[in-house]
Image (tube, grey):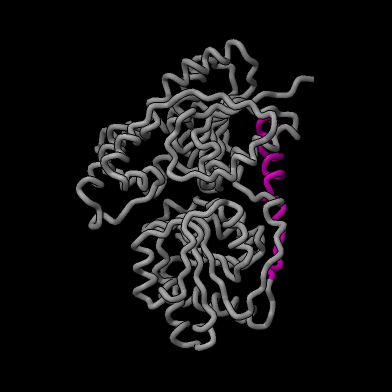
Amino acid sequence: MDSKKVLIVTYYWPPAGGPGVQRWLKFAEYLPEFGIEPIVYTPENPSYPMTDNSFLDKLPKGLKVIKTRIWEPYRLAEFFNPKSKEYKAGRFEKKEKQSILSRLSVYIRGNFFIPDARKFWVKPSVKFLSNYLKENQVDVLITTGPPHSMHLIGLELKNEYPNLKWVADFRDPWTQISYHSELKLTNHSKKKHKELERAVIKTADCVLATSFSDAENYSLIGADKTEVITNGYESNDFKIEKKIQNQKFRISYSGNLESARNPVEFWKALKDMTDQNHEFKNQLEINFYGILSAEVEESIAENGLSKYLKKFGYVNHQSAVEGIVNSELLLLTNFSDSKSKGIIPGKLFEYLAARNPVIAIGPADGDVSRILYQTSAGKYFEHSDKEGMKAYVLEVYDEFRFGHTETELKSIEQFSRIEITKKLAAVLNGR
C-alpha cells in the first residue's frame, strides 16, 4: 500500500535557527515511521532573524524539499534600519525607547503587510503548488505559521481543491498573541487581520494548537475541529552526563528574552537572597543562552546581579542543550497579560528532558502550570509573586546544597518527539 503523502508549507526550515524550525523538522523525520511521507515546500532565499547550521546535519535523508524564490521587503528594511530584524522576530522595545524609524517600521509592518511581510510569496506559491497538486499525489496539505501568510496559501489552495484535506498548524496565535497590540494597527487593519484569521480557522479541516487555551480560542472563532499537538523534546539530544559543580548554583535560561517578558520581581527576589544569604551570594551564577534585551540586562544590573551574569549569546541548539543540562534551576518566563496564558514555549519540553527543576513565570492559570503540575517538574508563579519565587529558589538551593542533583519527573515521555509525532499521525490519518 502506498504511504499517505503530506505537503508541508513552512517558512522556517534549516538553516533557520530557533524553535520554529524544530517542530516540523522533527515531524518530517518521524512521520515515515507511521506510514506518512512528508514533502516540504519552503522559500529558496528567505531572510531569517537567526540561523543554526547544525540543523542542516539533522535533515532526514531522502526527504523531498521543494523551493521557490520569495521577495521580502524586510531585506530593504534591514538595510535602512538594522533593528527591524528584532521586529521580524517578534521583539519590541518599550514605546518610550523606540526611535522614530523603529516606530515607523512597526506601523508599516502592521498596516501595509497583512498578515506579514511574507504575503508576497502567497500568490506565486498558490500558482506553483496548484500545478504541483495536478501532477502529484498529496493527501493532506499542512500550513504552519507564523508567519501566518503561510495559512493564506492553504486557504487559496483549499478553495481551489475543496476535497484536499487541509491542516492549519498555529505554532503561535495570530491576533491573540501579546505583541499583536504593539503593531500600531488602524481599525481597518485590525478588521482585516481578524477576517483573514477567521477565514483560515473556519475553512481548515483541522486546526492544530500548541496549547490547551489556544485550542479553545480557535473553537470559539469557529474551527470545525481542533487538536492540541504540543512541542516536544528529542531524546537523543539529552544523552549527556551532567557536570556537577558544587561551587556554583547555576540558574539558566535558553532562548531570546525580550523586555515584554522581563521577570522583574524574580531579579528582586534574587537580590534579596544575595543580600540575606552569604553562601548563596558566593555560589549564584545566572546563564543566558540566547539574545538578552538591553532592558532585561538593565533590570539585572539595577538589582546588583551583573557580577553573576554570564551571557553566551545565540548558540547552536546542542550547546544550549548542554547548558540547560548543566544547571541547577531553569528559568522560563512568559508575557504577563492573560491573553498569553496559552503560550507553552518549546523550551519547556527541553527543560523537562534536562531533568532540572523549572521556575516558570507568567499570567494567572497559564497552560505551562498544567504541564509542570502533571510532571512534577517545577513551580509556576505570576509575575508579581516575589515571595513565592524566593521561597522556591531557596527550596531548590537547599536541595543543591545537600547533593540532590536530579528532579524526579512523571510522565515526560509523552512529550518526546516520537510520541508527539505518533499523535500527529493519528490526526493526519483521521483517527
User: Please, what is the dominant secondary structure of the magenta stretch?
Assistant: helix
Q: Nearer the viewer, residue 86 or 110?
A: 86
Image location of residue 158, percent across then percent down: 51, 20
Quick check: 90 left or right of 342? left
Query: Residue at the spot x=71%, y=64% of the render?
Result: 241
In the picture as drawn, the residue positioned furthest to the right comes out as 1
Query: Residue at the spot x=54%, y=87% of the render?
Result: 279
Query: Residue at the spot x=22%, y=45% of the render?
Result: 101
Q: Nearer the viewer, residue 125 or 382?
A: 125
Which segment did they paint magenta?
406-431
Query: Residue at the spot x=49%, y=39% of the render?
Result: 218
- Magenta stretch: residue 395 in it? no
Q: Is residue 367 above or below residue 298?
A: above
Image location of residue 185, percent across then percent down: 27, 40
Q: Could you tell me which quadrant the N terminus lies in?
A: top right
Q: Is residue 184 above or below residue 363?
A: above
Q: Quadrant of residue 302?
A: bottom left
Residue 216 visible in the picture: no
Image location of residue 229, percent across then percent down: 61, 42
Residue 66 visible in the picture: yes
Quick check: 109 left or right of 53? left
Q: Could you tell me which quadrant the C terminus lies in?
A: top right
- Magenta stretch: residue 429 in it? yes
Image location of residue 224, percent across then percent down: 54, 31
Q: How many marks?
A: 0
Q: Quadrant of residue 263?
A: bottom left
Quick check: 195 left or right of 394? left
Q: Is residue 19 above or below residue 134?
A: below
